[in-house]
Amino acid sequence: MSNNLYNLNSAIEDFHQARQRASIQEVIARFTGRSNQLLSYDDVAQKLRLNTRTERGIQNIPLTAIVGSVGRYTDFTRTFLPLQDNDRERWARVKAAMNSSLGLPPIEVYKVGEVYFVLDGNHRVSIAKQEGLQTIEAHVIEFKTDAILTPETKLDDLIIKSEYIDFLEKTDLAHARPNVDLSVTIPGQYEKLMEQIDICCYIFTNEQEEKAALQDAALNWYDDMYIPLAEAIRDRELLQWFPGRTITDLYIWISENRTALEKELGWQIQSETAVTDLIMKRTATSEAGSWRKARTIARYTEHLFEDILIPLSGQSESWDALHQGIVIAQRENARLHGLHIVKTKEEAESNEAQEVKARFEQLCRDANVQGTLAVDVGDITARIIERAIVTDLILVKLVNPPGSGLSVLNSPFRTIIERSSRPLLTVPAEATPFTRALLAFDGSELAKEALFVTAYLAEMWKTEVTVFTARGDENRKEDIQDYARRYLELHEVEARYIISQQKEPRPLHDIAAEYNADLILMGSHSGNKIQQVLVGSMVDITLRSSTIPTFICR
């Protein structure tokens, strides 16, 4: 009797220590924001729709895999420390019995995935954990589920798994596409996917004049909408910008971002440009070369210029930019995004602004190209830079080219070139077909951007190419041109190569005229601003003198 009393008193002391540790865990949980609660079997069963049960008999199960309780999940912490002071007597009696020669029968648990929920024996589990045991004898009843549950599973994870099971059940995608992986990391995402599928179902119903099956619409959505963008995300390794997220997460964010952009800009935006915008917002930068990096895959598989920004003043000469845009759009199957910028909201709603919009869109229809124009209010240069990020090329009429001296620093063209991550095509006069191009190549990183575009035009447009090198150390000019030669030969492009032998480089427009070129390609400003003001920039000099379009790479 005395031994039993000693065991009971010792067990009560152990209970008080366990309660103290539980209180500490509760405080830590509040500070860290991490849940310290056991999972409720009833919640899990409801979310995962657990129905089919199988008797698994008596087994030794790992205590670390017990994560919840059938009825007493609020009485213990996640590590099964006691939370109720009035539980002292029962907890102590159970511990005393477990330590006696009589022992206690196996606990009873429900198994779901790789975790267990205590049906009977919560106190025995609590005591076994406090004593550092690794396993406990249990009568196991297993409930079948397609969800993967582990001891690390969080409540949000359970919600997501529940929503995923419901989504797969409604769409039948798991059977139609056995390797489907549409995992997400945030609850509520599958509802957004269902909205897209419902739209597909509605469209199919209207087209077929009979109600389309949800499963058929889901399959078409998956094959025609989800897979192409998911493959682009994977091929371009875009998840590196979004650590801890999945392809489906990014797919949904891109879809939402595109919708927001279309609403904001008044244009239709393709998914790939929405991706670029999303990445730019994520990295808060428009670093040089980002356009080429984003378009490298498309350069070999699709078209390089799919979305073209064309700012228009509405003055008669500004329409030359649209005519050049139409030439490109017809070759590239591109979308033209017109932009008419005014100072006030009243001007935006005026008849003059609406006439510019109507004329732009009518000229596009007449040329059989896709084109819409948005009327915006604000600073012209700032609005062009903002909207350029969701396009592939800025195409502008060259009306007031950069001046010389200090005035060059205030040039809007210079600001666009320096601050935009998109290349700029200036049109000084009439549109040209880009049959013969002059590439100014000095070996710089910016010139390599221009080389990238030149190779594309030579391959896809069959543009004749002349490579001209004037800058750089006399001993390096051959090496500089050799780089361009090897790059173009790699792409099976034949070109004419010219190295200037003069100390003072000839103006590019003279070289272009000599070889009857109708396009100049070059990198943007190089050197520091003091040099550009005192000596003059090749870009600024070319913009002031050229009578043919100039393609400037950022």
Image (tube, rainbow, N blue to C red):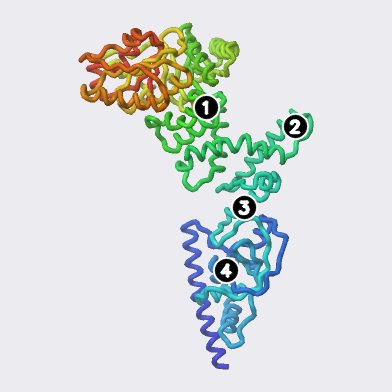
Mark 3 falls on what kind of element?
helix
Residue sticking out furthest to the top: 316
* Residue at 59% from the left image edge and 88% from the top image edge: 101
**Mark 3 crowdedness (10 Å alpha carbons): few <14, some 14-19, many ≥20:** many
Q: Which amino acid is tagged 3?
A: Lys
The dot on residue 302 is 1
Q: Which amino acid is tagged 1?
A: Glu
The dot on residue 161 is 3
Q: Is residue 316 above or below residue 455?
A: above
Viewer-side residue, 39 vs 507: 507
Q: Is residue 301 above or below residue 347?
A: below
Q: Is residue 86 visible?
A: no
Q: Are marks 2 and 3 in contact (CB under 8 Å)?
A: no
Q: Are marks 3 and 4 in contact (CB under 8 Å)?
A: no
Q: CA distance from mark 2 to mark 3?
A: 30 Å
Q: CA distance from mark 3 to mark 4?
A: 25 Å
Q: Which amino acid is tagged 2?
A: Thr
Q: Viewer-nearest of labels 2 and 4?
A: 2
Q: CA distance from mark 3 to mark 1?
A: 37 Å
The C terminus, quarter of image: top left
**Mark 2 crowdedness (10 Å alpha carbons): few <14, some 14-19, many ≥20:** some
Q: Viewer-nearest of labels 1 and 4?
A: 1
Q: Which residue lies under the disc numbered 2?
A: 205
Q: CA distance from mark 1 to mark 2?
A: 31 Å
Dot placed on the residue nearer the N-terminal end, 2 or 4: 4
Q: Which amino acid is tagged 4?
A: Phe
Dot placed on the residue nearer the N-terminal end, 2 or 3: 3
**What x and y, as percent, mark residue 422?**
42, 25
Residue 173: image quadrant is top right
Q: Which residue lies under the disc numbered 4?
A: 76
**What x and y, as percent, mark residue 495?**
37, 18
Give the left or right position of residue 439, taking residue 431 as reference.
Answer: left
